[in-house]
Image: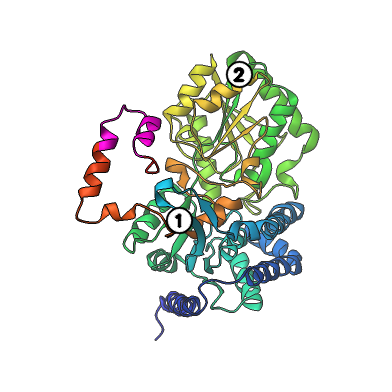
């Protein structure tokens, strides 16, 4: 009689086999050449381009409805653009980076070289199944690592396709996709990786980090949080409101850098609501009934979002649906975008990360008050500031802390291939994208090469010379220049 755990047991066994094979392969090839790394990234690019239509179909299957142009733009073209940038920069990134030495070290040399870490794991969320699996894979392969990816069980069609694509493109001892559920996820986090990337919620992030800590595995955590958009006085206009609402419509709010709530000057609150309604009426009057509206990933998530709105209704909050006759369709899991205007601070929409098409709009009386309210919460993954007064914008940026920020737009800090992306505090740690991503998945080994004419022997017993040097330095005025003059060539 078969056990209900057999599929998961088989998935865990396959993970362990792939991990052992990759460890063995890395031991035999610890520093892939530039040419080999480029070949691997080019193979990845070919894999994505060849499967473009299948990727769109898999996303539509998992989400119920998923806009094909959005799939092409983010999940395919975004990955290819990132890969092209890395290919252009990789030779320079791999080159040793010289470090300064001191005159007392004579002709010594010092440099930092980026070494591959080894076998790297990636636990992928459901919202961007290819961008957040294949995208970081580019950084990992560029750094010379071997990679195992664990897709989300919420996107089974995407997981199966990714597994098939990777198996047809790479040997399992270079890149492998482990498909399974919760038990596999737990085994994955507990595997002694050389580095582990997790993207998802802070709650699960804590569990992943705790499991990784048992093996002293370094982790990169890309978490979420309540990303605010702050419209400074005078900035509530059609273009800026369109940027906020348009960003909220991307993936129907199921994006970690989406706008979670909006801070608006109190005298401009009604103007914001009017501009938001006018924008949706103009560009997407039937949004929730169109193919441009991404379905909510599951009925459980749809019910959670409906409960957030019901909690606001029960508390007599003002809710504005940005679509005439917009309704929730449980069959396709689509729902319209709704504003919760001037919400009480203890409503669930103000306490939980929303991750869906609900936008609290919070009035404020002065910018300092708005900044204080941002700082009273956890540090967000993204912060968005709108306005024309550069001094006010600079003040907001200087007096807040977030993983990334954007001015007069939203979310673009996460889209640049050249700029590291990540969080701070509860929104995560570490970076991927760009040179920061290459370094994140590399060991930055400092190397010192001794030359001639140095004073290194003063560190060895007997310490007669060392005592004389220390006395000479300490007897001089507390100025670096004076100390250096007292002991030429030491500092």
Say if mark 1 contacts mark 2, CB within 8 Å. no
Give percent across and percent down for residue 91: 65, 61
> Which of the numbered marks, if any, corresponds to residue 108?
1
Query: Which numbered mark, 1 or 2, is in the foreground of this view?
Result: 1
109 magenta-colored: no
Q: Nearer the viewer, residue 134 or 291?
A: 134
Magenta stretch mostly in which secondary structure? helix
> Which of the numbered marks, if any, corresponds to residue 426?
none
478 magenta-colored: yes
> Which of the numbered marks, if any, corresponds to residue 391?
2
- Residue under the point 38% across and 51% down: 206
Boundaries of the magenta span: 472-487
Give percent across and percent down for residue 161: 64, 70
Q: Earlier in the sequence, mark 1 or mark 2?
A: 1
Residue 62 sits in quarter: bottom right
- Residue under the point 43% across and 65% down: 194
Residue 456 sits in quarter: bottom left
Q: Is residue 433 visible?
A: no
Give percent across and percent down for residue 323: 71, 35
Q: Nearer the viewer, residue 464 or 229?
A: 464
The residue carrying pointer 2 sits among few (fewer than 14), some (14 to 19) or many (20 or more) residues within 10 Å by Cα, namely: few
The residue carrying pointer 1 sits among few (fewer than 14), some (14 to 19) or many (20 or more) residues within 10 Å by Cα, namely: some
Secondary structure under tag 1 reads loop
Q: Nearer the viewer, residue 135 or 489?
A: 489
Residue 358 sits in quarter: top right
Secondary structure under tag 2 reads helix
5 vs 469: above or below: below
Q: Is residue 266 visible?
A: yes
Q: Nearer the viewer, residue 78 or 8?
A: 78
Q: CA distance from mark 1 to mark 2?
A: 47 Å
């Amino acid at each position: 009689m078969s056990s209900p755990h057999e599929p998961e047991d088989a998935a865990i066994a396959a993970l362990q086999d792939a991990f052992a094979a990759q460890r063995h392969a890395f031991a035999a090839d610890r520093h892939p050449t530039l040419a080999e790394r480029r070949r691997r990234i080019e193979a990845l690019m070919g894999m994505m381009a060849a499967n473009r239509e299948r990727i769109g179909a898999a996303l539509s299957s998992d989400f119920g409805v998923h806009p094909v142009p959005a799939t092409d733009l983010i999940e395919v073209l975004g990955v290819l653009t990132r890969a092209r940038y890395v290919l252009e920069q990789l030779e320079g990134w791999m080159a040793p980076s010289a470090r300064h030495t001191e005159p007392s070290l004579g002709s010594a040399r010092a440099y930092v070289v980026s070494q591959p870490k080894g076998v790297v794991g990636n636990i992928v969320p459901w919202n961007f199944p290819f961008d957040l699996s294949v995208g970081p894979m580019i950084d990992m392969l560029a750094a010379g690592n071997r990679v195992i990816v664990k897709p989300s069980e919420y996107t089974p069609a995407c997981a199966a396709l990714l597994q098939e694509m990777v198996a047809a493109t790479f040997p399992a001892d270079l890149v492998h996709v482990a498909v399974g559920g919760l038990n596999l996820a737990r085994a994955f986090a507990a595997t002694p990786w050389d580095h582990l990337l997790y993207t998802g919620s802070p709650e699960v992030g804590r569990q992943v980090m705790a499991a990784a800590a048992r093996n002293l595995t370094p982790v990169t955590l890309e978490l979420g949080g309540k990303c605010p958009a702050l419209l400074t006085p005078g900035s509530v206009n059609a273009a800026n409101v369109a940027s906020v609402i348009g960003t909220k419509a991307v993936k129907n709010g199921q994006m970690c850098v989406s706008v979670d709530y909006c801070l608006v000057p109190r005298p401009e609150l009604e103007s914001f609501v009017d501009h938001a309604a006018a924008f949706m009426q103009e560009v997407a009057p039937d949004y929730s009934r169109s193919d441009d509206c991404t379905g909510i990933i599951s009925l459980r998530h749809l019910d959670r979002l409906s409960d957030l709105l019901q909690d606001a209704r029960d508390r007599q909050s003002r809710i504005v649906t940005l679509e005439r006759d917009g309704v929730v369709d449980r069959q396709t899991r689509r729902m319209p975008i709704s504003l919760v205007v001037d919400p009480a601070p203890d409503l669930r929409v103000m306490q939980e990360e929303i991750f869906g098409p609900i936008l609290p709009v919070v009035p404020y009386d002065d910018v300092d008050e708005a900044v204080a309210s941002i700082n009273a919460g956890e540090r967000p993954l993204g912060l968005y500031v709108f306005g024309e007064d550069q001094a006010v914008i600079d003040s907001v940026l200087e007096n807040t802390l977030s993983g990334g920020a954007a001015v007069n737009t939203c979310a673009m800090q996460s889209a640049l291939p050249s700029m590291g992306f990540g969080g701070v505090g509860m929104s995560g740690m570490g970076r991927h994208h760009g040179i920061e991503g290459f370094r994140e998945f590399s060991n930055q080994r400092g190397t010192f090469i001794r030359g001639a004419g140095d004073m290194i022997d003063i560190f060895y017993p007997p310490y007669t010379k060392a005592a004389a040097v220390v006395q000479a330095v300490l007897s001089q005025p507390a100025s670096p220049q004076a100390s250096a003059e007292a002991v030429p060539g030491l500092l």
